[in-house]
Amino acid sequence: MADSNETNLKCADYADDAVAALYCDSPEVVSQCLNACQKLECESEDDDSNNAYLVGAQVLVFFLVFGLSASVNFAQFRDRFRSKGVYLGLACQFVAMPLLGFLTVAAFRDHIRPTFAVVLLIVTSSPGGSYSNFLCNLVNADLALSVAMTSVSTIVSVFMLPFNVFVYVQTAYGALLGEGGRDDIVQLLPYNVIGYTLANVIAAVLLGLAFGFRWPHLQRSVNLFGTLCGLGSIVLGLTASLTSCETPLEQNAIVYLAIAIPPLLALLVALFGASVARLPKAQRVSIAVECAFQNTGIGLAVALSLGAEGRAAAVVPIIFGAYDAFLVGGFAIASMFFGWTLTPKGIPLWEAFVFEHQETAAGPPPGSGDNENRNDNNGDDAGIVHDDKNNPGEVDPEFQTTRKDDPNAVVLI
């Protein structure tokens, strides 16, 4: 603008060519001048609403994690910490997934804007997401192992998330962009937001476990509330992204395809590792699902703290979560059909979803030979009492199936 002292005009005033000619360099740049002014006003409005979106995201993430953690069978949860599956899951979560995220960003760096790349790298460096627990419960994978991995990865992420962010975002990705790019990346990183988001999630896990242990009769209701909060966080993220001044849905199509690569490859890597470790099949499914599902709430909170362009990048964790639901969900349901879960063979799909069979995962510590053989039976004669000649007898009442909506069933719904 020619006269920088006149700053009190609204953008609408520039629609008049005569007025615009006074305050812009020439009539030929009226359109550019108007667009720039409107963008500044829009970004100012974004700044005013960003804090509200950020607080809303933190509240919804807390109650999502709290509700799902409160639904855990505490005895099985405790036993799963003796499983080597937990440690294999941690390796996939904090070594394989962040590396896959960086390789994806590096391969498509010419097509992905830095803000979008930073948010994707933070998502792939985050701990496991609680929707993995929901999915493992739905298909009757090893739910206790899934929740144990989610809880442990969330606590370990206090150290590993900042470490991976420093390694892959600030150092490696910054090096790809050059000196100027590295400086911009450092300015983008909101370590304070990452810190209190992690604290929020850890508090939710611990309080949820304590709540479920103290008031088990309320687990079903609290879990339902947490699930609704999870759906609310998705709606909030979409709203924040689509109402930003940027154009989140007008990126190069390669961007949206690139987001699918980390969860797909992480699923395959985790499944391969769990198979090499000869874990029970139900645990292999849980580990693969857990390692591919990320806590996208952390990426969403970080995106909403990065201004107008960050709000546009909030679409990244939303799309990542959608790929998780489609790719990982499809794998989980397929694994049930192939007999890799605790669902007994031959029952209808609706019955597999409605009834839970987590009792078949009880018994010897996971990872032991007895438990491995037992789980590999996939519930065919789980709970059957055998005589001393190993002839099957009657069903042990402990292993009777219960409905997933039974208030006495301590499961995620």
Image: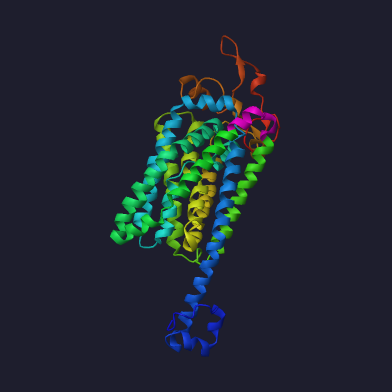
Q: Is residue 211 magenta?
A: yes
Residue 258 x %, y %: 42, 56
Question: In this view of the protein, which residue sits in the foreground, 113 or 344?
Answer: 113
Question: In this view of the protein, which residue sits in the foreground, 255 or 70?
Answer: 70
Question: In this view of the protein, which residue sits in the foreground, 113 or 1?
Answer: 1
At x 53%, y 25%, the residue is 78
Report if residue 377 is visible in the image.
no
Q: Is residue 163 above or below residue 258?
A: above
At x 46%, y 20%, the residue is 369
Would you say 91 lies left or right of 38 here?
A: left
Residue 202 x %, y %: 52, 38
Would you say 135 lies left or right of 260 here?
A: right
Q: Is residue 356 above or below residue 126?
A: above
The stretch of residues the image draws in magenta is 209-219
Q: Is residue 20 above or below residue 43?
A: below
In the rendered image, which quarter contains the N terminus? bottom left
Residue most extreme to the front: 5
Residue most extreme to the bottom: 18
Q: Toward which corner of the image does residue 69 lie, by quadrant?
A: top right
Q: Is residue 278 above or below residue 234?
A: above
Residue 92 x %, y %: 41, 39
At x 71%, y 32%, the residue is 407
| Prevalent SS, magenta region | helix
Residue 292 x %, y %: 47, 43
In the rendered image, which quarter contains the C terminus? top right
Residue most extreme to the top: 388
Report if residue 328 is visible in the image.
yes
Q: Is residue 311 magenta?
A: no
